[in-house]
Amino acid sequence: MNKLSNEQAQRILKRRNESGFTLLQMVIVVAIIAVLSTVALMGVTSARAGQRRINSARLFASYLEKARVDSVRRRAGTPGNPLAKVTVLDATTYQVFIDFNSTGVPVARNVLLEPGITFYPDNIGKEIAFDWRGRTGFDHRFVLQNGDRRTNVEGDRNYETPVAVSGFGDVTINDGVYTPTVNSNSSNFNAPTPVPTPSLLPPPTPGGTPTSTPSPSPSATPTPSATPTPEPTPTPQPTPTPSATPTPSATPTPSATPTPTPTPDGGGGGSTPCSLSVTPTSGSIRKNGLTSASVRVSVLNALTGTTVTATPSNANEITVSPNSATVAAGGSATFSVSSRRNNAGFTYQVTFSSPECGNASFRVTVTN
């Protein structure tokens, strides 16, 4: 067996040291690096877009809170003292109307969402005004989204952030704030309470202790003067009692049989006027339209058919199908109530009305 010379061994060793990668191996490595870089870039871009959306939602919610506090601080609602409010002008701009400079005079400022963030089309033109108690009267819901995503409207949380405002003024981001299950639409929000409240405040300030002490002393004087008034009053009372003799002349009034004639005009049968009956009177449904409540509306004591119309307290959050139905005399119709809300803990009222037979209501609560 021939042995390798020293020169041949050096050549073989040099060739081994000069070996490298093949072209196929280099192409595979470059492709893997490109894929990983693309995935990382997409992840960073998506994370930045999500952070811009969350920042815009938090800023929008903070302005809602400022508007609520401003109305409470100024006791807004009196003449010359308008309510603080927030209005969505377009897909990327909303207007804040509050007292920014603490001068007692609110001014309007426009605020832009961060780049790439928009409101849902349903939110454009919506306005929220807070009264002097910080309440809105109805529940409101806004959705901030990345770009113009019109698909999956009810909530792909990877691309949208909801901001809800209850009728009591509670601002919620992503269902992070608990809202009590109370029908805010029947809590007398529109009562003119702000007007009497400021009128009660002036009397305590001028009404010092010296003014209050003389007031009871003259008030005691009219009490004895009232004693002679009841003395003469019983004397004229016996005189009208004999005058009761003309009451028999009221005999023509029972002959006024036209009293049953108005009942057909009201749709009632016989002496009992017609009315609406709702079965059941209350119920619960799941959010996002997962379930619906079936309501049966009956027409009682009717001579002819009537049209029953369903009106929800908040048409943006509650849907009723059908909107109206024609019900025969003594018949009934079935309505379906479902929710558009993305969160639970809200209560609404659906009013069923008929021009001839009045109204009846159904109370519905949105749950998980």
Image: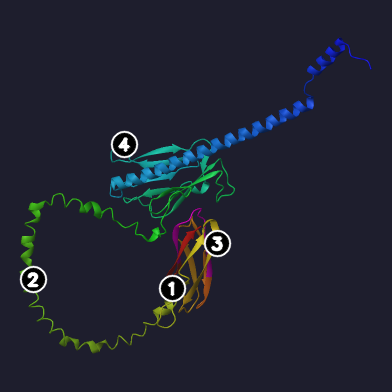
Find residue 229 and name its label: none
Residue 191 vs residue 214, the one in the foreground: 214
Where residue 357 is drawn, which disc sits there?
1
Q: Amino acid at mark 4?
A: Asn
Q: Residues within 10 Å of mark 1 (few under 14, many from 20)?
A: many
Give the CA separation, mark 4 to mark 1: 54 Å
* Residue depth check, mark 4 versus mark 3: number of the one nearer the observer: 3
- Quadrant in which the N terminus is drawn: top right
Between 41 and 140, the one lying in front of the other is: 41
Q: Residue 101 shows which numbered tag?
A: 4
Do tag 4 and tag 1 residues touch (Cβ < 8 Å)? no
Task: Give the number of the disc on residue 291.
Answer: 3
| Residue type highlighted by circle 3 | Thr
| Horizontal arrangement in the rendering, residue 219 relative to residue 352 (left or right) | left
- The Cα–Cα distance between marks 4 and 2, rounded to whole angstroms, is 57 Å
Mark earlier in primary sequence (4, 1): 4
| Closer to the eye: label 1 or 3 | 3
Which stretch did the figure color magenta? 334-351
Q: Position of residue 177 (x, y in %)?
A: 43, 50
Q: What x and y, as percent, mark residue 154?
A: 55, 51
